[in-house]
Image (tube, rainbow, N blue to C red):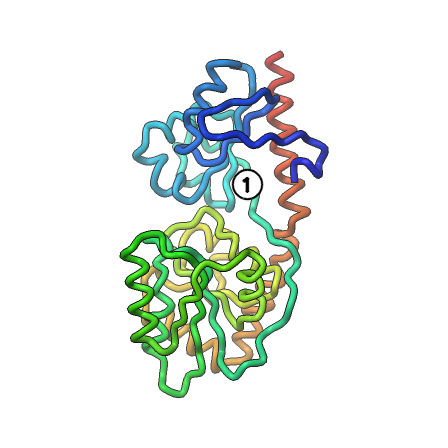
Amino acid sequence: MLRAAGHRAVLADPGSVPRCDVLLALHARKSAESVVRSRSLEPDRPIVVALTGTDLYVDIHRDDDAKRSLELADLLIGLHGRAAEELPPRLRGKMRVVPQSAPPARGGKSARRAFEVAVVGHLRDEKDPLRTALAARLLPPASRIQVLHAGAPLTPEWKRAALEEARENPRYRHLGELPLAKARALIARSQVLSLTSRMEGGANVVSEAVAAGTPIVASRIPAMEAILGADHPGLFAVGATKELSALLERVESDSRFLRDLARRSRSLRRALSPAREKALLVAVLREALAMRARRG
């Protein structure tokens, strides 16, 4: 996106600082060394720090390196409209919201007899990755729901848990890590995307579901309320297996409800479009460059 906008974007390893007019640091904690070095080597160079979900909900509250990145940054990028709530009040004015986007989706809904529910995300604690599978266990015997989970287990414990769930739960299939195109195709063909995270910075899979017009059910966390709307009828309490199961039963049996969720996904396409993400990102860089000009 930066190169398409006419900028020369250089990728650098954490800790290094190449010659540049603006440092765009991805992740407050992991890029902390680069942030410190940039401020030390060239104090007038603007620093923009893009915050992940782990930054917002974990690191900036307890990690000194992440906290220092917030202080040294001129601007901060959040991926949803409630990201600034996690910052100290005196730093909230630095926040600029740049929602993640996804390109237009290809392919249509599955014609298979199963009612496919996609779960797309690596298996790690923050994602609560088997919650949809556990909810599917509670469905009535006549349900046609099949949970298709794309994502790599990030620990041996999660690998064992996924294998055990697949053995014991006929409604759950673990597909492992898929190439990006295949993961997007899975989202596009599925009847519903289920996102069960305990925390999220932005959740790119939501943007991909929006691009495909796929209905979304998601845990009621700040990011999902900000992106989907606090009144989105597909939201459920974090970790609420029975509530999610009831939602899945409803989306399968109530075609009007399913159509409403699909309409809500389509209505977000402009807000989560690549064109808008690019424009907002470029605006942040221009603001940062204007800061450099004022300092000069």
Instruction: Give the vertical position of 86 relative to 64 (above or below).
Output: below
Q: Quadrant of the N terminus?
A: top right
Residue hosting label 1: 97
Instruction: Give the vertical position of 24 relative to 97 (above or below).
Output: above
Judge whether residue 94 can be spotted in this image.
no
In this view, the residue in front, 249 or 264, is 249
In this view, the residue in front, 162 or 143, is 162
Q: Quadrant of the C terminus?
A: top right
x and y percentages locating residue 109 in the rendered image:
59, 73
Left or right relative to 172: residue 1: right
Q: Residue placed farthest to the bottom in the image?
A: 142
Q: Residue at x 50, y 59 (%)?
A: 178
Residue type (three-letter) at the residue carrying disc 1: Val
Q: Residue at x 51, y 44 (%)?
A: 79
Q: Quadrant of residue 134?
A: bottom left
x and y percentages locating residue 72 in the rendered image:
45, 23
Judge whether residue 41 can be spotted in this image.
yes
x and y percentages locating residue 155 in the rendered image:
31, 52
Q: Quadrant of residue 214?
A: bottom right
Q: Residues within 10 Å of mark 1 (few under 14, many from 20)?
A: some
Instruction: Give the vertical position of 253 relative to 19 (above or below).
Output: below
Q: Quadrant of residue 181?
A: bottom right
Left or right relative to 49: residue 243: left
Residue at disc 1, secondary structure = strand
Q: Residue at x 36, y 35 (%)?
A: 60
Q: Residue at x 54, y 36 (%)?
A: 96
Q: Residue placed farthest to the top in the image?
A: 296
Left or right relative to 40: residue 108: right
x and y percentages locating residue 293 in the rendered image:
64, 17
